[in-house]
Image: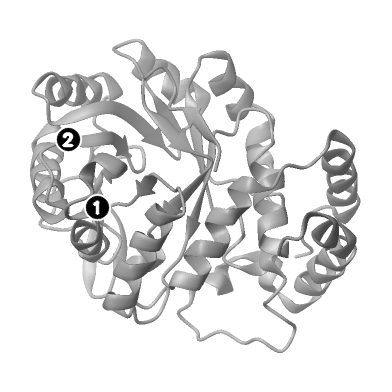
Amino acid sequence: MNYRPLGYTNLQVSTIALGTWSTGGGPWWGDTDEAEAVRAIQASLDAGVNLIDTAPMYGFGRAEELIGRAIRGRRDQVVIATKCGLWWTDARGSRWFEHQGRAIYRSLRPDTIRIELEESLRRLGVDCIDLYQTHWPAMPPDPTPIAETMACLLELRDQGKIRAIGVSNVTPAQIEEYLAVGPVAACQPRYSMLDRRIERDLLPFCLQRNIATLVYSPLEQGLLTGRIGMDRTFSPGEYRNMIPWFRPANRRRVLELLDGWRDLCEAHRCTMGQLVLAWTVAQPGVTCALVGARKVAHAEENAAAGDVTLSADELARMRRDLELLGAPAD
Protein backbone atom coordinates (compact mmCIF):
# COMPACT_ATOMS: atom_id res chain seq x y z
CA MET A 1 0.00 0.00 0.00
CA ASN A 2 1.16 3.50 -0.80
CA TYR A 3 0.52 6.47 1.48
CA ARG A 4 0.28 10.20 0.80
CA PRO A 5 0.02 13.33 2.97
CA LEU A 6 -3.48 14.51 3.86
CA GLY A 7 -3.02 18.03 2.58
CA TYR A 8 -1.02 20.27 4.90
CA THR A 9 -1.44 17.94 7.92
CA ASN A 10 1.09 15.44 9.25
CA LEU A 11 -1.37 12.62 8.60
CA GLN A 12 -0.43 10.01 6.01
CA VAL A 13 -3.36 8.25 4.31
CA SER A 14 -3.55 5.14 2.15
CA THR A 15 -4.17 5.68 -1.56
CA ILE A 16 -6.99 3.14 -1.32
CA ALA A 17 -9.42 4.15 1.42
CA LEU A 18 -12.62 2.58 2.71
CA GLY A 19 -15.85 4.39 1.92
CA THR A 20 -18.85 3.34 3.96
CA TRP A 21 -21.88 4.75 2.18
CA SER A 22 -23.11 1.24 1.36
CA THR A 23 -22.22 0.00 4.86
CA GLY A 24 -25.20 1.93 6.18
CA GLY A 25 -27.52 -0.21 4.05
CA GLY A 26 -31.06 0.95 3.36
CA PRO A 27 -33.06 1.01 0.10
CA TRP A 28 -30.19 2.48 -1.94
CA TRP A 29 -27.92 -0.46 -1.17
CA GLY A 30 -30.00 -3.29 0.30
CA ASP A 31 -29.53 -5.01 3.63
CA THR A 32 -26.16 -5.05 5.37
CA ASP A 33 -24.86 -8.12 7.21
CA GLU A 34 -23.47 -6.24 10.20
CA ALA A 35 -21.05 -8.94 11.35
CA GLU A 36 -19.59 -9.29 7.84
CA ALA A 37 -19.41 -5.51 7.43
CA VAL A 38 -17.39 -5.25 10.66
CA ARG A 39 -15.05 -7.99 9.44
CA ALA A 40 -14.67 -6.16 6.11
CA ILE A 41 -13.61 -2.98 7.91
CA GLN A 42 -11.08 -4.95 9.96
CA ALA A 43 -9.83 -6.75 6.83
CA SER A 44 -9.24 -3.35 5.20
CA LEU A 45 -7.09 -2.27 8.13
CA ASP A 46 -5.21 -5.57 8.05
CA ALA A 47 -4.46 -4.97 4.36
CA GLY A 48 -2.95 -1.52 4.94
CA VAL A 49 -5.96 0.75 4.46
CA ASN A 50 -5.87 3.41 7.17
CA LEU A 51 -8.46 5.99 6.07
CA ILE A 52 -12.12 5.23 6.72
CA ASP A 53 -14.65 7.73 5.42
CA THR A 54 -18.20 7.83 6.71
CA ALA A 55 -21.10 10.17 7.53
CA PRO A 56 -24.07 10.25 9.89
CA MET A 57 -26.37 10.05 6.85
CA TYR A 58 -25.07 6.57 5.96
CA GLY A 59 -27.82 4.46 7.46
CA PHE A 60 -28.81 7.22 9.90
CA GLY A 61 -25.74 6.57 12.04
CA ARG A 62 -25.50 2.84 11.37
CA ALA A 63 -22.25 3.04 9.40
CA GLU A 64 -20.56 5.06 12.14
CA GLU A 65 -21.70 2.56 14.76
CA LEU A 66 -20.31 -0.38 12.78
CA ILE A 67 -17.00 1.43 12.32
CA GLY A 68 -16.90 2.06 16.05
CA ARG A 69 -17.30 -1.66 16.68
CA ALA A 70 -14.66 -2.56 14.10
CA ILE A 71 -11.92 -0.19 15.30
CA ARG A 72 -12.28 -0.82 19.02
CA GLY A 73 -8.74 -1.37 20.28
CA ARG A 74 -7.26 -0.21 16.95
CA ARG A 75 -7.85 3.55 17.08
CA ASP A 76 -4.18 4.32 16.48
CA GLN A 77 -4.32 2.52 13.12
CA VAL A 78 -7.15 4.60 11.68
CA VAL A 79 -7.61 8.05 10.18
CA ILE A 80 -11.32 8.67 10.72
CA ALA A 81 -13.13 10.99 8.34
CA THR A 82 -16.78 11.79 8.90
CA LYS A 83 -19.11 14.63 7.99
CA CYS A 84 -21.75 17.11 9.05
CA GLY A 85 -24.45 18.95 7.18
CA LEU A 86 -27.27 16.48 6.49
CA TRP A 87 -29.78 16.83 9.29
CA TRP A 88 -32.99 14.96 10.05
CA THR A 89 -33.78 15.61 13.74
CA ASP A 90 -36.00 18.66 13.14
CA ALA A 91 -36.69 21.34 10.53
CA ARG A 92 -33.49 23.36 10.98
CA GLY A 93 -31.74 24.00 7.69
CA SER A 94 -33.16 23.72 4.16
CA ARG A 95 -35.30 20.74 3.23
CA TRP A 96 -33.60 18.73 0.46
CA PHE A 97 -35.25 15.32 0.04
CA GLU A 98 -37.07 12.55 1.87
CA HIS A 99 -35.43 9.24 2.73
CA GLN A 100 -37.03 6.28 4.48
CA GLY A 101 -39.87 8.44 5.70
CA ARG A 102 -37.64 11.19 7.09
CA ALA A 103 -37.18 14.72 5.77
CA ILE A 104 -33.48 15.44 5.16
CA TYR A 105 -32.26 19.02 5.57
CA ARG A 106 -28.99 20.59 4.47
CA SER A 107 -27.78 22.46 7.54
CA LEU A 108 -24.36 23.92 8.21
CA ARG A 109 -25.57 26.02 11.13
CA PRO A 110 -23.20 26.02 14.11
CA ASP A 111 -25.91 24.70 16.44
CA THR A 112 -26.63 21.60 14.34
CA ILE A 113 -22.93 21.01 13.57
CA ARG A 114 -22.12 20.86 17.28
CA ILE A 115 -24.89 18.32 17.88
CA GLU A 116 -23.83 16.21 14.88
CA LEU A 117 -20.23 16.12 16.04
CA GLU A 118 -21.11 14.91 19.52
CA GLU A 119 -23.33 12.19 18.08
CA SER A 120 -20.59 11.06 15.68
CA LEU A 121 -18.03 10.92 18.49
CA ARG A 122 -20.44 8.79 20.52
CA ARG A 123 -21.28 6.38 17.69
CA LEU A 124 -17.64 5.99 16.65
CA GLY A 125 -16.49 5.58 20.24
CA VAL A 126 -13.68 8.13 19.91
CA ASP A 127 -12.84 11.48 21.46
CA CYS A 128 -11.53 13.17 18.30
CA ILE A 129 -12.35 13.06 14.57
CA ASP A 130 -9.26 13.22 12.36
CA LEU A 131 -10.98 14.84 9.36
CA TYR A 132 -14.35 16.54 9.81
CA GLN A 133 -16.00 17.41 6.50
CA THR A 134 -19.02 19.44 5.42
CA HIS A 135 -21.14 16.94 3.47
CA TRP A 136 -22.97 19.36 1.13
CA PRO A 137 -23.03 23.16 0.94
CA ALA A 138 -25.81 25.01 2.70
CA MET A 139 -28.58 26.24 0.42
CA PRO A 140 -31.62 28.54 0.45
CA PRO A 141 -33.85 29.22 2.26
CA ASP A 142 -31.37 28.74 5.15
CA PRO A 143 -27.96 29.35 3.52
CA THR A 144 -25.59 29.62 6.48
CA PRO A 145 -22.62 31.77 5.38
CA ILE A 146 -19.45 29.76 4.85
CA ALA A 147 -17.55 32.09 7.17
CA GLU A 148 -19.97 31.25 9.98
CA THR A 149 -19.70 27.52 9.36
CA MET A 150 -15.91 27.69 9.19
CA ALA A 151 -15.67 29.70 12.41
CA CYS A 152 -17.59 26.93 14.18
CA LEU A 153 -15.34 24.22 12.74
CA LEU A 154 -12.22 26.11 13.81
CA GLU A 155 -13.63 26.40 17.31
CA LEU A 156 -14.21 22.62 17.41
CA ARG A 157 -10.65 22.09 16.20
CA ASP A 158 -9.30 24.36 18.91
CA GLN A 159 -11.28 22.37 21.47
CA GLY A 160 -9.48 19.21 20.32
CA LYS A 161 -12.62 17.51 19.04
CA ILE A 162 -11.45 17.48 15.41
CA ARG A 163 -7.95 17.52 13.96
CA ALA A 164 -8.50 18.89 10.45
CA ILE A 165 -11.30 20.40 8.36
CA GLY A 166 -12.50 19.11 5.02
CA VAL A 167 -15.22 19.96 2.50
CA SER A 168 -17.25 17.85 0.10
CA ASN A 169 -19.28 18.45 -3.07
CA VAL A 170 -18.07 22.04 -3.39
CA THR A 171 -16.73 24.36 -6.09
CA PRO A 172 -13.31 26.05 -6.10
CA ALA A 173 -15.05 29.36 -5.36
CA GLN A 174 -16.65 27.87 -2.25
CA ILE A 175 -13.31 26.49 -1.09
CA GLU A 176 -11.83 29.96 -1.50
CA GLU A 177 -14.46 31.23 0.96
CA TYR A 178 -13.44 28.57 3.48
CA LEU A 179 -9.75 29.39 2.99
CA ALA A 180 -10.43 33.06 3.67
CA VAL A 181 -11.30 32.03 7.25
CA GLY A 182 -8.97 29.08 7.93
CA PRO A 183 -7.10 26.08 6.51
CA VAL A 184 -8.78 23.28 4.56
CA ALA A 185 -7.00 19.93 4.57
CA ALA A 186 -9.11 17.94 2.11
CA CYS A 187 -11.87 18.04 -0.46
CA GLN A 188 -14.15 15.13 -1.33
CA PRO A 189 -15.60 15.20 -4.86
CA ARG A 190 -17.20 12.60 -7.11
CA TYR A 191 -14.71 11.27 -9.65
CA SER A 192 -14.18 8.23 -11.80
CA MET A 193 -12.73 7.53 -15.22
CA LEU A 194 -16.32 7.82 -16.49
CA ASP A 195 -16.95 11.14 -14.71
CA ARG A 196 -13.88 13.33 -15.05
CA ARG A 197 -15.51 16.77 -14.85
CA ILE A 198 -13.42 17.91 -11.87
CA GLU A 199 -10.25 17.62 -13.95
CA ARG A 200 -11.17 20.96 -15.51
CA ASP A 201 -11.03 23.01 -12.33
CA LEU A 202 -11.28 21.35 -8.91
CA LEU A 203 -8.36 18.92 -9.16
CA PRO A 204 -5.82 21.51 -10.36
CA PHE A 205 -7.17 24.00 -7.80
CA CYS A 206 -6.64 21.58 -4.92
CA LEU A 207 -3.25 20.47 -6.22
CA GLN A 208 -2.03 24.06 -6.35
CA ARG A 209 -3.22 24.78 -2.80
CA ASN A 210 -2.02 21.53 -1.21
CA ILE A 211 -5.54 20.30 -0.49
CA ALA A 212 -5.94 16.54 -0.52
CA THR A 213 -8.70 15.05 -2.68
CA LEU A 214 -10.58 11.98 -1.50
CA VAL A 215 -12.55 10.92 -4.57
CA TYR A 216 -15.74 8.93 -4.18
CA SER A 217 -17.50 6.50 -6.58
CA PRO A 218 -14.25 5.62 -8.45
CA LEU A 219 -15.71 2.25 -9.53
CA GLU A 220 -19.07 3.76 -10.49
CA GLN A 221 -21.00 1.59 -8.04
CA GLY A 222 -19.29 -1.55 -9.31
CA LEU A 223 -19.76 -0.98 -13.04
CA LEU A 224 -16.01 -0.52 -13.58
CA THR A 225 -15.19 -3.87 -12.02
CA GLY A 226 -16.56 -5.51 -15.17
CA ARG A 227 -18.72 -7.82 -13.08
CA ILE A 228 -22.05 -6.15 -13.70
CA GLY A 229 -23.12 -7.75 -16.96
CA MET A 230 -25.94 -6.97 -19.35
CA ASP A 231 -28.25 -9.42 -17.61
CA ARG A 232 -28.08 -7.62 -14.26
CA THR A 233 -31.24 -5.83 -13.16
CA PHE A 234 -31.82 -3.45 -10.25
CA SER A 235 -34.78 -2.86 -7.99
CA PRO A 236 -36.68 0.44 -8.53
CA GLY A 237 -35.19 2.20 -5.49
CA GLU A 238 -31.54 1.31 -6.13
CA TYR A 239 -29.11 4.18 -6.59
CA ARG A 240 -27.61 2.63 -9.73
CA ASN A 241 -30.82 3.38 -11.63
CA MET A 242 -29.96 7.08 -11.36
CA ILE A 243 -26.59 6.71 -13.12
CA PRO A 244 -26.76 7.06 -16.94
CA TRP A 245 -23.89 4.62 -17.49
CA PHE A 246 -26.05 1.79 -16.13
CA ARG A 247 -28.58 2.11 -18.95
CA PRO A 248 -28.22 -0.96 -21.20
CA ALA A 249 -26.78 0.77 -24.27
CA ASN A 250 -24.25 2.72 -22.20
CA ARG A 251 -23.38 -0.28 -20.03
CA ARG A 252 -22.56 -2.32 -23.13
CA ARG A 253 -20.09 0.34 -24.28
CA VAL A 254 -18.37 0.33 -20.88
CA LEU A 255 -18.08 -3.45 -20.82
CA GLU A 256 -16.51 -3.40 -24.30
CA LEU A 257 -14.03 -0.77 -23.12
CA LEU A 258 -13.04 -2.87 -20.12
CA ASP A 259 -12.70 -5.97 -22.25
CA GLY A 260 -10.01 -4.16 -24.23
CA TRP A 261 -7.90 -3.88 -21.07
CA ARG A 262 -7.75 -7.59 -20.27
CA ASP A 263 -4.12 -7.71 -21.36
CA LEU A 264 -3.25 -5.04 -18.79
CA CYS A 265 -4.91 -7.08 -16.05
CA GLU A 266 -2.90 -10.11 -17.11
CA ALA A 267 0.35 -8.12 -17.22
CA HIS A 268 -0.19 -6.77 -13.69
CA ARG A 269 -1.88 -9.91 -12.35
CA CYS A 270 -4.76 -7.83 -11.10
CA THR A 271 -8.51 -7.68 -11.40
CA MET A 272 -10.27 -5.11 -13.56
CA GLY A 273 -11.38 -3.22 -10.47
CA GLN A 274 -7.80 -3.04 -9.23
CA LEU A 275 -6.63 -1.79 -12.62
CA VAL A 276 -9.25 0.96 -12.62
CA LEU A 277 -8.38 2.03 -9.07
CA ALA A 278 -4.67 2.11 -9.92
CA TRP A 279 -5.43 4.40 -12.87
CA THR A 280 -7.61 6.61 -10.67
CA VAL A 281 -5.08 7.24 -7.91
CA ALA A 282 -2.38 7.90 -10.52
CA GLN A 283 -4.22 10.98 -11.84
CA PRO A 284 -2.70 14.37 -10.95
CA GLY A 285 -4.33 15.84 -7.88
CA VAL A 286 -5.99 12.64 -6.65
CA THR A 287 -4.82 11.70 -3.14
CA CYS A 288 -6.88 8.57 -2.55
CA ALA A 289 -9.89 6.67 -3.83
CA LEU A 290 -12.78 5.87 -1.50
CA VAL A 291 -14.06 2.38 -2.24
CA GLY A 292 -16.93 0.61 -0.54
CA ALA A 293 -16.77 -2.95 0.77
CA ARG A 294 -19.24 -4.85 2.91
CA LYS A 295 -17.56 -8.23 2.44
CA VAL A 296 -14.07 -9.33 3.46
CA ALA A 297 -13.17 -10.55 -0.03
CA HIS A 298 -14.08 -7.20 -1.57
CA ALA A 299 -12.16 -5.28 1.08
CA GLU A 300 -9.02 -7.34 0.46
CA GLU A 301 -9.34 -7.02 -3.31
CA ASN A 302 -9.77 -3.25 -3.14
CA ALA A 303 -6.82 -2.79 -0.83
CA ALA A 304 -4.54 -4.78 -3.15
CA ALA A 305 -5.07 -2.11 -5.81
CA GLY A 306 -2.70 0.02 -3.75
CA ASP A 307 0.13 -2.25 -4.90
CA VAL A 308 -0.56 -1.88 -8.65
CA THR A 309 1.62 0.66 -10.46
CA LEU A 310 0.88 1.50 -14.09
CA SER A 311 3.46 2.87 -16.52
CA ALA A 312 3.08 6.24 -18.20
CA ASP A 313 2.31 4.49 -21.50
CA GLU A 314 -0.38 2.35 -19.89
CA LEU A 315 -1.98 5.35 -18.22
CA ALA A 316 -1.97 7.26 -21.51
CA ARG A 317 -3.44 4.31 -23.41
CA MET A 318 -6.32 4.01 -20.95
CA ARG A 319 -7.03 7.74 -21.15
CA ARG A 320 -7.10 7.62 -24.96
CA ASP A 321 -9.62 4.80 -24.80
CA LEU A 322 -11.74 6.77 -22.35
CA GLU A 323 -11.75 9.82 -24.60
CA LEU A 324 -12.93 7.65 -27.49
CA LEU A 325 -15.70 6.28 -25.27
CA GLY A 326 -17.08 9.76 -24.77
CA ALA A 327 -20.14 10.62 -22.71
CA PRO A 328 -23.11 8.40 -21.91
CA ALA A 329 -25.99 8.54 -24.37
CA ASP A 330 -29.27 10.01 -23.10
Q: Position of residue 62 (x, y in %)?
A: 22, 66
Residue 260 percent coordinates (x, y): 90, 63
Question: Which element is circle 2 on?
Answer: loop
Which numbered marker is on residue 6?
none
How far separated are the C-alphas under marks 1 and 2?
11 Å
Q: Residues within 10 Å of mark 1 (few under 14, many from 20)?
A: many
Nearer to us in this view, 10 or 231:
10
Query: Which residue does the image show at 19% across and 57% down from the upper left?
Result: 68
Question: SS for tag 1?
Answer: strand
Quick check: 301 left or right of 255? left
The residue singled out by tag 1 in the image is 105
Front residue of this view, candidates 310 and 216: 310
Residue occupying image coordinates x 21% and y 37%: 129
Choose top left, top right, bottom left or bottom right for residue 152: top left
Residue 109 bears which disc, if any?
2
Which residue is located at x 44 percent, y 73 percent?
A: 295
Q: Amino acid at mark 2?
A: Arg
Residue extending furthest toward the top = 180
Nearer-the-camera pick, 182 or 288: 288
> Is disc 2 surrounded by few (<14), some (14 to 19) or many (20+) residues within 10 Å?
many
**Direction from residue 38 to residue 312 in the image, left or right:** right
Q: Is residue 244 visible?
A: yes
